[in-house]
Image: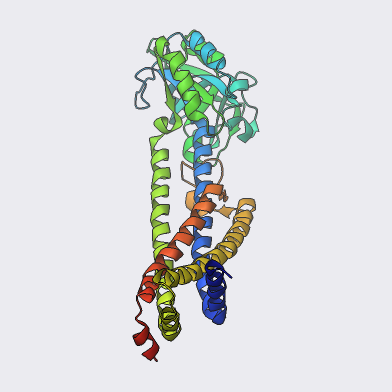
């Protein structure tokens, strides 16, 4: 039997010698691993929900806008050569979908009630591929009859329903204020009341005709395949730059969303350090206790010629077996919990009903990423080995005579 096999057998026997302590250590490491995997999965699910809400509610994956565009402008800049730009974007392919928009700030009124709104002219069949508004109708139809579609909160604020008239005071293409009346064709409802209260949609041809905008566009919204936003943006940037336009990705249009995700990532890293610092202290304490319990045994091993490296290897193997056992148990339990949370989710309605970043759903579902599971397991094993290193080195420096006299 070679030395490596001897150390393996001894390490397993040493752990089996005190099963209760071994089980408690495995449970402690498993709990830390379980917490990390589940928290990471919930964080990924939260990020997916936030991103879906941002992209699918209104923003899209990216937008082609006039150079110098800013959402703070009271009057958005019109795209130069809009038909040419739209043709360039639609020819991009790569699984992307594009929808042209014309958007103006306006004042909506009905009777004595008024409310500020953003009026957006869209091509209905293209817009329904980008945003979820068409699938959130609670009354009437979605832009099939040339009328207006508005949010339920706005309809309630103005006291109107489908078939009613809504008056819009908005600037014409030349900037001159004007008033136009439109029939309400449909009413939609998302999970974000503040959005529903401020967004009104019209067929783009109807809005262009009303304000005399010709072929004008304020933006072209693109929905890119998941994970390919940067590639699509880079491909578009080269095409539209010469036409006086630029490409903004969703995180440039909504930087607050990106910051929230970055904060969540940083918080998770801090949580990981705290959880495994606690686990490491537990392992150090356990391995130190084992050292004192086995003083005489280790002294005999040293007296019989076991090198210091052999003592370190033996104790590190014990820590590694603890970590591997905890990885199996913790990962299995965490994946089971994540599966349940991915199917049933957590209802956060009480906490997110007014959150602009969860406009599509208030149900948080876990999303497991293979790298997150692997990283948690690697950190668990590394923590166990690192925590056992100090007691191992201390054991390797034992003097046989002092160890054999220890009682």
Q: Quadrant location of the N terminus?
A: bottom right
Taking depth in this image into account, of 70 and 102 the one nearest to the observer is: 70
Taking depth in this image into account, of 176 and 204 the one nearest to the observer is: 204
Residue 157, can we see it? no
Which residue is depicted at the point 65% across and 27% down? 141
Residue 32, above or below 132: below
Taking depth in this image into account, of 293 and 100 the one nearest to the observer is: 293
Across and down, in percent, residue 71 comes to 38, 27
Across and down, in percent, residue 201 comes to 53, 25
Which residue is depicted at the point 51% across and 33% down? 55
Display coloring? rainbow
- Dividing the picture into quadrants, the one containing residue 253 is top left
- Dividing the picture into quadrants, the one containing residue 240 is top left
Residue 299, above or below 175: below
Residue 81, can we see it? yes
Q: Quadrant location of the C terminus?
A: bottom left
Count of number-bearing discs: 0
Across and down, in percent, residue 137 comes to 62, 33
Residue 17, above or below 317: below
Which residue is depicted at the point 55% across and 20% down? 99
Residue 402, above or below 189: below
Across and down, in percent, residue 170 comes to 43, 19
């Amino acid at each position: 039997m070679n030395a490596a096999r001897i150390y393996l057998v001894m390490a397993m026997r040493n752990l089996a010698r005190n099963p209760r302590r071994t089980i408690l250590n495995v449970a402690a490491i498993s709990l830390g691993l379980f917490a990390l995997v589940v928290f990471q999965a919930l964080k990924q699910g939260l990020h997916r929900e936030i991103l879906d809400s941002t992209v699918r509610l209104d923003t899209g994956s990216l937008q082609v806008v006039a150079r110098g565009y800013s959402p703070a402008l009271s009057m958005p800049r019109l795209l130069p050569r809009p038909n040419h730009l739209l043709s360039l974007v639609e020819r991009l392919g790569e699984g992307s979908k594009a929808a042209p928009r014309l958007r103006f700030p306006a004042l909506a009124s009905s009777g004595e009630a008024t409310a500020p709104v953003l009026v957006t002219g869209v091509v209905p069949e293209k817009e329904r591929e980008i945003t979820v508004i068409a699938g959130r109708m609670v009354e009437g139809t979605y832009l099939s009859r040339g009328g207006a579609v508005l949010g339920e909160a706005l309809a309630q604020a103005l006291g109107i329903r489908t078939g009613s008239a809504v008056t819009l005071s908005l600037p014409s293409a030349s900037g001159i204020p004007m008033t136009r009346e439109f029939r309400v064709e449909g009413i939609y409802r998302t999970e974000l009341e503040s959005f529903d209260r401020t967004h009104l949609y019209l067929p783009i041809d109807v809005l262009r005709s009303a304000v005399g905008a010709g072929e004008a566009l304020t933006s072209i919204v693109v929905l890119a395949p998941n994970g390919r936003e940067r590639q699509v943006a880079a491909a578009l940037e080269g095409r539209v730059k010469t036409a006086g336009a630029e490409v903004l990705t969703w995180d440039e249009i909504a930087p607050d969303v990106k910051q929230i995700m970055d904060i969540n990532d940083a918080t998770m890293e801090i949580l990981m350090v705290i959880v495994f610092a606690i686990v490491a202290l537990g392992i150090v304490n356990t391995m130190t206790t084992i050292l004192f319990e086995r003083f005489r045994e280790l002294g005999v091993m040293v007296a019989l010629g076991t090198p210091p490296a052999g003592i370190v290897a033996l104790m590190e193997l014990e820590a590694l077996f603890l970590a591997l056992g905890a990885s199996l148990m913790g990962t299995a339990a965490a994946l089971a919990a994540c599966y349940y949370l991915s199917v049933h989710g957590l209802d956060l309605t009480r906490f997110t009903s007014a959150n602009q970043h969860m406009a599509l759903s208030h149900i948080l579902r876990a999303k497991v990423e293979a790298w997150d599971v692997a990283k948690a397991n690697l950190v668990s094993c590394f923590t166990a080995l690192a925590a056992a290193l100090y007691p191992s080195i201390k054991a390797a420096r034992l003097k046989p005579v002092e160890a054999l006299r220890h009682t």
